[in-house]
Amino acid sequence: MSLRFTPTVSCVLRVSGEDAKPYLQGQCTADLREGPVHHALWLNRKGRVLAYTTIFLQADGSWLLVSPSSTPDALTKIVSANLIADDVTVLDESPSWNPGVIWGEGSPTADSFKLVFTAGYGVKAWNVLAPTGSAIPWPTATWAELEEARIRQGAPSVPVDCGSNEFPQECGLDAWVSYVKGCYLGQEVMARIQSMGSLRRVLRSVESVGSNLSSGLELRSADGAKVLGTIKSAAGRVALALVSIDLNEGAMLSTSAGEVRLGKVAQLGRPA
């Protein structure tokens, strides 16, 4: 499959000022000391996921934060929540950019674009920021097509699979959590999960043996007596579901749409 471009409604914030780097370092899960590009989660104090951003350093020392699933107002509120006397400015630059995802076979090369590699879709893909009004040299694919590819590959997404009720580790997002950089919001909870492994749920691929599946569908024991999980995102007969960690690959569960079979644990970049 040749390269295609899927438009997104991503918001783009620019964070600048003398305290920008230490402030961001203390707020998100990424370690900004490790290179110019970062996948970062924003957690609450209980370790639950509020947002996901790609963060990348600019030549002038500022940082661009790109989120494919947050509105500018919502992300600005999350990013600015703990600003007190810091020399940090947060500006919404979303109108200046035409955001999207390039995915498929090959590698995009265009000097007029800002490309950020991302593992978040389960397929070879790049987040792209094109200046507003610039021509896009690839054919367009719909968001539904990209979502289906992601779900079939078993790749988790924020917030549809992992949001304000989930820990990153439940949804295979460990790679976006630093355990060594020091204090940040939710860090104590992340450290406790790492040391004790105290998870009760895990995100898994599931496949229906018959009917199409839908978000919010309950997964029950074979006799229907006990709720064992919930479907988070779905595309036809395949889906990702948050289920009891005690269930194994291949287990058969019942739903109001018929039986489903549990697949592999969801993980970034890992086929289902």
Image (spheres, rainbow, N blue to C red):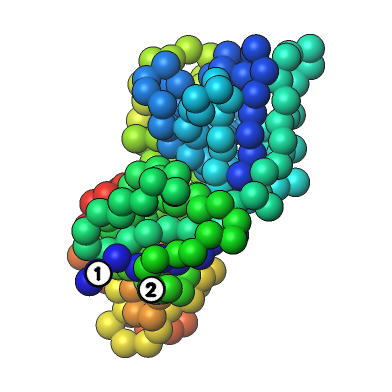
Is residue 252 left or right of 239 when viewed as pictured? left
Q: Residue at x 30, y 73 (%)?
A: 207
What residue does disc 2 label? 139
Q: Determine whether label 2 and label 1 are within 8 Å by CB.
A: yes
Quick one: label 2 or label 1, which is nearer the N terminus?
1
Q: Amino acid at mark 1?
A: Ser
Residue 31 on image: x %, y %: 43, 21
Residue 69 on image: x %, y %: 57, 54
Q: Amino acid at mark 2?
A: Pro
Judge the density around disc 2: few (<14), some (14-19), many (≥20) Cα neighbours within 10 Å. Answer: few
Disc marking residue 213: none
Total marks placed: 2
Residue 182 on image: x %, y %: 48, 12
Q: Quadrant of residue 39?
A: top left
What residue does disc 1 label? 2
> What secondary structure is found at the residue carrying circle 1?
loop
Residue 226 at least partly seen: no
Q: Residue at x 62, y 19 (%)?
A: 20
Is residue 57 left or right of 249 when viewed as pictured? right
Q: Nearer the viewer, residue 232 or 227?
A: 232
